[in-house]
């Protein structure tokens, strides 16, 4: 049985409250209930408000530019602006009837424009002065043949024939032709194998005094060496001709017949023939008759200079030289050759300064003078480096003709470099890989092009200097193959640049699409290499493992930290 509850009598005050229906704890309970309800309501409302707030927040415009990197900031419209300025400078040439930015024309004005832009960007600039021989054509040349029936055939300059650069001056008439085949049997070889001709004095032993030497194009030695040997053997003039059918679309060449030293020239007239005319003089049915050659030329000595600027940051003993020649030929303003490369170089330099990048490895920008006279600016630079300065140079990047109208995307074949050590080949190949890497990221086809030393990287990879190099080119006077047409479009069996070294190489000759793509690859490659912590090991050690920590963030003037594009290793 349950116990009975004890009854406690109420006080009078409690009785009054009870009669009114109240309780001494009712207000407290009510307050607690209200507070709990409010808290529950807040717990429900706040997350909803946050979601609504997020959903109603103005979204970032999808067209807004991403954080700037070097590659994104190097824009083709800015490069074209530099090209327009260089075009105007060339058009203002008063030294001749042809617009030009050559050494004796508007090169100095071109360099002043670049220097002003660099100064405005905050760089300290300097120049390196040197003397160059300038070849001048004083009057149109004459090339005629008098046939046996007394008829005179006059050939057309720059169509049938051309005066080669640094040809001697004079007038020659003669019937005796001394002709060398492209190859001849080597009597000193037990196998009797054919060897290229024209590179040894023995090749000219049978020449008669006063003869005109008819010599084949080949690259086993320089045209100067061949012409010099012919002159020393008694020739009064030299005619270069095409022998191989692979040159059946080639016009006459204006290649140089001058050596590396200032006094290495010839004094006799030197001309070249187109392929069709070569067949008449060097083919099976050879023309006979009196030949008349007249050239009116001179060589004058002029001062010119290289222009430099470099980043204030970075290791000076891991120096990256980014070079492009700024001069043009006398025959035109050279907007593709090489306004395109030098303007790209300038815009990259400006953007590095604008973004206030602080590279690990110092970058020296160079605008070479007198490239069109035989790489004279870059040769002067490298030949005046001390052994210690050579050791401080990590590599050279070269950009020459990066806007050809019938283009390919060419990467120099550093991995195929055969004229140096295995170490040089490996280093040049590593530079090549970075360019390939960017084209692969962009899903752009590219071609590996000859690494022959034809441009200003040549003096760097010379055996006595041995500074690794790499670069880009969109093609010059070579012919586009059918395979290349299928890769890039354009015209097969036509030159990559049909205005190469001609007056029509104006700003309208530059393809802006490929110019932008090559500028992007140039900026990307420099951006990667200038942040490699141990650049010498990167270029030399097959076991080197890249530390990308420096590539994760780059610093800007406002000290904002942003990511650059991720770097991948491309496996072709």
Image: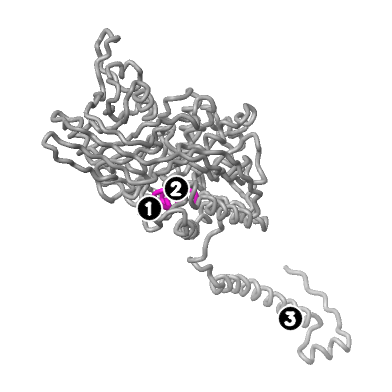
Mark 1 packing: few (<14 Cα in 10 Å), some, or many (20+)? many
Would you identify the image quadrant in which residue 30 lies? bottom right
Q: Residue 505 carries which label?
A: 1
The residue shown at (25%, 33%) is 242
Q: Give above or below for 236 relative to 299.
A: above
The residue shown at (27%, 7%) is 190
Q: Is residue 47 visible?
A: yes
| Front residue of this view, candidates 252 and 567 | 252
Among the two numbered marks 1 and 3 on one chain, the one whose residue lies closer to the N terminus? 3
Distance in Å between CA atoms under marks 1 and 2: 10 Å
Q: Is residue 569 visible?
A: no
Query: Residue 225, how many percent across, how many down?
Result: 39, 26
Q: Give above or below for 563 relative to 570.
A: below
Label 1 close to label 3 by CB (< 8 Å)? no
| Front residue of this view, candidates 325 and 90 | 90
Query: Residue 204, how many percent across, how many down?
Result: 31, 19
Distance in Å between CA atoms under marks 3 and 2: 94 Å
Among the two numbered marks 1 and 2 on one chain, the one whose residue lies closer to the N terminus? 2
| Front residue of this view, candidates 370 and 531 | 370
Q: Circle 2 is placed at which residue position?
A: 328
| Front residue of this view, candidates 318 and 506 | 506
Q: Give above or below for 432 relative to 34.
A: above
Horizontal side, residue 508 vs residue 117: left or right: left
* Marks 3, 2: nearer the viewer: 2
Distance in Å between CA atoms under marks 1 and 3: 92 Å
Range of residues picked out in magenta: 330-343
Q: Which mark is residue 30?
A: 3
Label 1 close to label 2 by CB (< 8 Å)? yes
Among the two numbered marks 3 and 2 on one chain, the one whose residue lies closer to the N terminus? 3
Outermost residue toward the top in this view: 190
């Amino acid at each position: 049985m349950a116990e009975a509850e004890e009854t406690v009598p109420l006080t009078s005050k409690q009785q009054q409250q009870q009669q009114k229906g109240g309780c001494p704890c009712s207000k407290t309970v009510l307050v607690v209930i209200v507070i709990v309800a409010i808290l529950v309501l807040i717990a429900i409302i706040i997350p909803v408000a946050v979601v609504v707030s997020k959903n109603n927040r103005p979204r970032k415009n999808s067209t807004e530019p991403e954080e700037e990197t070097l590659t994104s900031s190097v824009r083709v419209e800015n490069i074209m602006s530099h090209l327009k300025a260089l075009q105007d400078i060339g058009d203002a040439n008063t030294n001749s009837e042809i617009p030009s930015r050559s050494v004796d024309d508007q090169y100095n004005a071109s360099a002043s424009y670049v220097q002003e832009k660099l100064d405005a960007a905050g760089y300290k600039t300097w120049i390196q002065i040197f003397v160059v021989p300038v070849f001048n054509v004083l009057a149109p040349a004459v090339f005629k043949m008098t046939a046996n029936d007394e008829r005179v055939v006059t050939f057309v300059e720059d169509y049938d024939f051309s005066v080669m650069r640094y040809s001697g001056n004079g007038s020659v008439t003669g019937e005796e032709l001394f002709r060398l085949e492209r190859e001849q049997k080597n009597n000193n070889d037990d196998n009797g194998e054919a060897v290229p001709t024209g590179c040894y004095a023995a090749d000219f032993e049978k020449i008669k005094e006063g003869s005109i030497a008819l010599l084949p194009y080949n690259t086993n030695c320089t045209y100067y060496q061949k012409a010099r040997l012919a002159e020393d053997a008694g020739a009064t003039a030299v005619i270069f001709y095409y022998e191989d059918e692979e040159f059946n679309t080639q016009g006459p060449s204006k290649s140089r017949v001058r050596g590396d030293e200032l006094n290495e020239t010839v004094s006799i007239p030197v001309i070249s023939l187109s392929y069709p005319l070569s067949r008449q003089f060097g083919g099976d049915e050879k023309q006979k008759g009196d030949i008349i050659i007249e050239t009116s030329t001179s060589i004058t000595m002029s001062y010119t200079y290289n222009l430099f600027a470099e980043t204030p940051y970075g290791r000076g003993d891991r120096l990256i030289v980014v070079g492009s020649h700024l001069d043009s030929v006398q025959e035109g303003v050279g907007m593709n050759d090489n306004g395109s490369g030098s303007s790209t170089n300038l815009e990259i330099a400006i953007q590095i300064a604008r973004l206030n990048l602080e590279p690990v490895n110092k970058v020296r920008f160079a605008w070479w003078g007198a490239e069109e006279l035989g790489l004279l600016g870059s040769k002067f630079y490298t030949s005046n480096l001390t052994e210690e300065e050579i050791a401080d140079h990590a590599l050279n990047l070269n950009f020459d003709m990066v806007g050809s109208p019938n283009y390919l995307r060419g990467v120099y074949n550093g991995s195929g470099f055969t004229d140096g050590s295995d170490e040089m080949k490996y280093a040049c190949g590593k530079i090549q890989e970075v360019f390939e890497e960017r084209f692969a990221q962009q899903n752009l086809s590219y071609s590996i092009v000859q690494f022959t030393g034809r441009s200003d990287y040549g003096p760097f990879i010379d055996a006595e200097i041995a500074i690794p190099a790499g670069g880009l080119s969109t093609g010059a006077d070579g012919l586009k193959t059918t395979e290349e047409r299928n890769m890039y479009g354009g015209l097969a069996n036509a030159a990559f640049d049909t205005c190469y070294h001609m007056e029509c190489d104006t700003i309208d000759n530059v393809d802006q699409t490929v110019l932008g793509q090559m500028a992007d690859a140039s900026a990307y490659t420099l951006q990667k290499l200038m942040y490699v912590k141990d650049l010498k090991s990167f270029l030399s050690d097959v076991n080197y493992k890249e530390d990308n920590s420096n590539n994760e963030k780059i610093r800007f003037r406002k000290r904002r930290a942003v990511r650059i594009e991720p770097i991948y290793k491309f496996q072709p």
